[in-house]
């Protein structure tokens, strides 16, 4: 009987698949770019939100300023300060103050 021959599988050569390597590198680079842009983009969005809040605050303060300025102009007219003082309960020297209590409420 002839000696048994052992058959071996042909040695497989693992060739580097450059197309796959290129895709992986490209995905890595794109992922890196996304990571680099996320932080500044988030900061930009936060800054926009803060700017809108500050604008609303400035508008509210401007309305308050306008209201106070109108009040100042009104109080600079003659007689207005005296009327305001009387509304607050002040009297002129020599006048006799009266306090009226238990008046019926009008509707």
Image: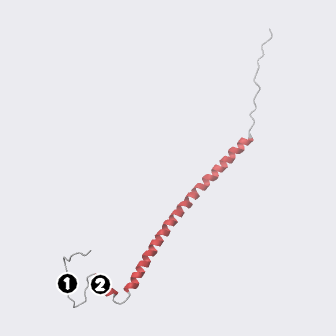
Residue 49 to residue 106: above or below: above
| Dot label at residue 98 | 1
Residue carrying label 2 = 85
Expressed as whole percent of the image width and height from the top left, the position of residue 34 reads 62, 52
Expressed as whole percent of the image width and height from the top left, the position of residue 25 reads 69, 46
Mark 1: few, some, or many residues within 10 Å (few <14, many ≥20)? few
User: Which residue occupies 57% across, 56% down?
Assistant: 39
Residue reaching furthest right? 2
User: Which residue occupies 63% across, 51% down?
Assistant: 32
User: Which residue occupies 69% across, 47% down?
Assistant: 26
Expressed as whole percent of the image width and height from the top left, the position of residue 87 reads 28, 82
Of the pair 27 and 66, the residue shown nearer to us: 66
Of the pair 79 and 32, the residue shown nearer to us: 79
Label 2 residue SS = helix
Q: Nearer the viewer, mark 2 or mark 1?
A: 1
Residue reaching furthest bottom? 94
Instruction: Point out the image quarter for the N terminus.
Output: top right
């Amino acid at each position: 009987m002839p000696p048994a021959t052992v058959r071996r599988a042909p040695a497989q050569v693992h060739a580097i698949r450059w197309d796959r390597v290129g895709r992986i590198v490209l995905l890595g680079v794109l992922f890196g770019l996304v990571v680099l842009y996320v932080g500044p983009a988030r900061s930009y969005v936060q800054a926009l939100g803060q700017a809108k809040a500050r604008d609303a605050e400035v508008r509210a303060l401007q309305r308050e300023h306008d209201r106070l300025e109108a009040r100042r102009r009104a109080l600079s007219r003659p007689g207005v300060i005296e009327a305001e003082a009387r509304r607050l309960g002040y009297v002129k020297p020599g006048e006799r103050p009266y306090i009226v209590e238990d008046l019926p409420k009008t509707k």
